[in-house]
Amino acid sequence: MNIQVAAQATGPRADTGRDAGIGRDAAMRRMMLAFLVAGFGALLVGATIGPLQALNYAGINAYPSLRPLLQTYYQGLTIHGVLNGYVFTFFVTCGLLVYLPARELGVTPGLAPWRACFGLMAAGTACLLYAMFDNSSSVLWTFYPPLKGSPFFYFGMTLLTIGSTMPLPILLAMRATWKRARPGQVTPLVTYMSLVTMLMWVMAGIGALAELVLQLDPWSIGLIAAVDPIIDRTLFWLTGHPIVYFWLMPAYISWYGLLSRQAGGKLVSDPMARLTFALLMVFALPVGTHHQFADPGFSQVWRGILVVLTMSVAMPSLITAFTLGLSLEYAGRLRGGTGLFGWFRALPWGDPSVAAQVLAAVTFILGGATGIVNGSWQLDAIVHNTIFVPGHFHVTVGSVTAMTFMAITFWMVPHLTGRRLVSRRLALAAAWLWFAGMMLFAVGMQWAGLYGVPRRAWISALPHGTYHALYGAASVPLALVAAGGVVLWLATYAFFAVFFGTILFGRRAAPPPVPFAQAIGGPADHAIDAPPSPAGAGPSPLARALEHVWILAGVTLVAAAAAYVPILWPFLHHVTRAPGWVLW
């Protein structure tokens, strides 16, 4: 793999080295911009369709007016879920988790494998778009069999998933280069968190890839006649809930690794950040089992054990809440904030990147609390398959991940293009509108879920009287859902006016640097050619212990096997076979 250290030579040969270094730097920026444009291009389409689902719950059926582009609610829901949940998040994450470590370490990544990663995901996305827009694959984002889509859908999903794992070897090679130059030192924080995220994702991806390669791909082209839906569902959730952490952990990287400096302070604890990521990796794989509380076929004892495993993932989220809160308070007090909440008001709310991330963190309080409801066996039985579940989902991925990724673009697009934001006010408006719209939408969905309003249901197609007889009691929360969807529409277009406007028309300016945060007591610069850390500034014993990422990966695999083997074992001994269904 072609990994190179940033050129620092002098003399006659230095010009060649500098030219090569400038060329590699420009190639890195172009590649990162390509990942951002591809990811946010997917979000533009997916987010445009999203509010149609909100109107559906208010009894407004917009789909007949959209033919022939969109035929059904289920087609629109599939496009919305796949583009936002997979394509948007995968492209942005696979760009960030290579680019940020490369900048932190001062090492150029292997551009060929990074381009191959982009190429595989782009090919997979093209297949998915074809399969969804020709209305052959309205199988929703979970693509549960026996619903059967076209081969383009499953092979597209396979290519997209394989491509999303390719940053791992690039990260390992960059880390090895840095460690050879700095033997005995622990991996810098952003690189460590990126590496742990990708290790978790590669292990989690085994479930979806096994489902696709062994079952759905050959089934879709007729090599096998039937599949076992419950086994495929189990394999899906081996990946399907860890994917939430594949969305959240890059947002956490920005909160831990960048936000403290953007807010004017420092990260209060480097070891706590590392511990959070280590715990997320270990707990992420077993936690997916809570999606099967309502499924038949495995024992009640295991369902109780799985509740404990699911609740365990709240621990790293609580560590994040306290560490991030203290870091922001430190920044606010450095900026003159006094009193109990004065530090919060003193944060730089005029910076759209900071404002969007802090607002995203606020919404996550609701997302984390409602996640505990979903993870409880008893409470899950009340909200299962109601719109409470997507309500929770939208205050995690729809706010924490999407808002933080938007926030990152507010400094990263100027950094990559050398162009100023076209409008900081419009960027701020996008952040606040997204926050307000998402809170209205999510609160409305969770409230309506308590009335039993079902998820994944085209209820606006019901006759007027039937709709009101079934869902009239939930009219107020369903009106909030629709209002939230309209506000989110406004936020979407405000954001994209800033995003594409800056790329195309922003005024030329010196590119801002990557705002890496400095941990209290830690070095200011981790680049491979930076001066060594001062005496007494060494890493903590906890940071050194967590440096053994392969041991953590082994523990994760053992925990995942302990959770899944007792579930899969009875299914493998009582196989059911189902042919494909096309219900749209």
Image: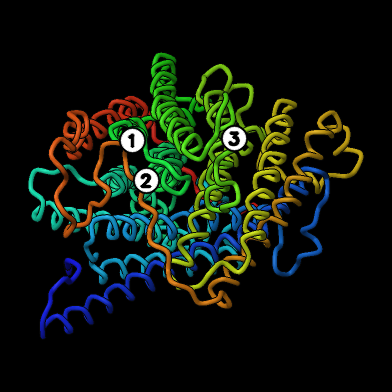
Q: Earlier in the sequence, mark 2 or mark 3?
A: 2
Give the Cα distance between marks 2 and 3: 26 Å
In the image, 352: left or right of 266?
Answer: right
Give the Cα distance between marks 1 and 3: 25 Å
When the figure is inspected, residue 498 is found, relative to residue 576, above or below; the finding is below
Indicate the quadrant containing the N terminus: top left, top right, bottom left or bottom right.
bottom left
Local SS, label 1: helix
Identified by mark 2, the residue type is Gly
Q: Are circles 2 and 1 on residues that touch, CB within 8 Å?
A: yes
Marks counted in the figure total 3
Image location of residue 480, percent across then percent down = 78, 39
**Residue found at the very far right of the displayed protein:** 465
> Which residue position is annotated with label 2?
257
When the figure is inspected, residue 196 is found, relative to residue 374, above or below; the finding is below
Can you tell which mark lies on residue 273?
1
In the image, 77: left or right of 67?
Answer: left
Can you tell which mark lies on residue 392?
3
Q: Which colour scheme is used?
A: rainbow
Q: Which of marks 2 and 1 is nearer the N terminus?
A: 2
